[in-house]
Image (cartoon, rainbow, N blue to C red):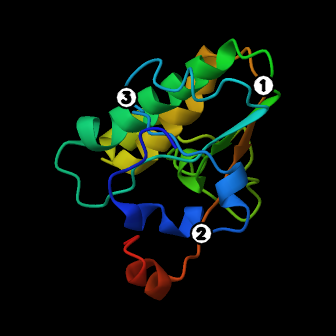
Amino acid sequence: MCGVPDDPKKINHLVSLDGAKERLHLYKANLLEEGSFDSVFQGCHAVFHTASPFYHDVKDPQAELLDPALKGTLNVLKSCVNLPTLERVVLTSSVAAVAYNGKPRTPDVVVDETWFSDPDFCRESQMWYTLSKTLAEDAYSIVNTIILSSIVRSFLFVNIKKCKATGFL
């Protein structure tokens, strides 16, 4: 484990998994630091990019949401571009990236890959998380030499009691 987070509570649930001692490798990297993932991804066949901040009470949208989402995604994708073993990148997106464009959603509207959120609409509406996820989705068009799967989820259900007990929340 290289540069593992300092707080063991944040990783205990991972290192206690069956087979973790033999197969789990944890690394510390900085989403906002270009090249931070280069050595971490060496030899990987797939990369799952799931990190993106989610806050409601945002004081500085650029620093708290937009930069980490966009720059973080770009840095992950740039680290993936020249990996000879990489077969796929999976980006965890959000319904926020495809649902807000100012157009009316009537019962006959099909929300699909043509129905992306409009960054200008998101800025005008101060929908900062939605804007951050939309920009992160757009990052792929900048680095489009890799195979990307985007998982758009609308809700993530978690066991709040368990998360609080383990210090995750």
Provide the secondary structure element on which disc 3 rests.
loop
Q: Earlier in the sequence, mark 3 or mark 1?
A: 3
Which residue is outermost to the bottom?
A: 161
Q: Residue at x 54, y 45 (%)?
A: 26
Which residue is outermost to the left?
A: 59
Q: Residues within 10 Å of mark 1 (few under 14, many from 20)?
A: some
Quadrant assignment, res 145: top right
Q: Position of residue 13 (x, y in %)?
A: 54, 69
Inspect the image, locate mark 1, and give the three-letter code of the amino acid beneath it.
Answer: Leu
Q: Residue at x 65, y 51 (%)?
A: 24
Q: Position of residue 85 (x, y in %)?
A: 80, 22
Q: On the picture, is 148 further left or further right than 133?
A: right
Q: Nearer the viewer, residue 95 or 83?
A: 83
Q: Nearer the viewer, residue 18 or 84?
A: 18
Q: Residue at x 27, y 35 (%)?
A: 62
Is residue 155 placed above or below 111 in the rendered structure? below
Q: Position of residue 44 (x, y in %)?
A: 73, 31
Quadrant showing the C terminus: bottom left
Q: Residues within 10 Å of mark 2 (few under 14, many from 20)?
A: few
Provide the secondary structure element on which disc 2 rests.
loop
Inspect the image, locate mark 2, and give the three-letter code of the amino acid beneath it.
Answer: Ser
Q: Earlier in the sequence, mark 1 or mark 2?
A: 2
CB-based contact (under 8 Å), mark 3 and mark 1: no
Closer to the observer: label 1 or label 2?
2
**Residue that carries the numbered disc 2 in the rendered image:** 16
Q: Earlier in the sequence, mark 3 or mark 2?
A: 2
Is residue 142 placed above or below 121 in the rendered structure? above
Q: On the picture, is 60 further left or further right than 107?
A: left
**Residue that carries the numbered disc 1 in the rendered image:** 86
Quadrant assignment, res 109: bottom right
Q: CA distance from mark 1 to mark 2?
A: 28 Å
Q: Which mark is residue 32?
A: 3
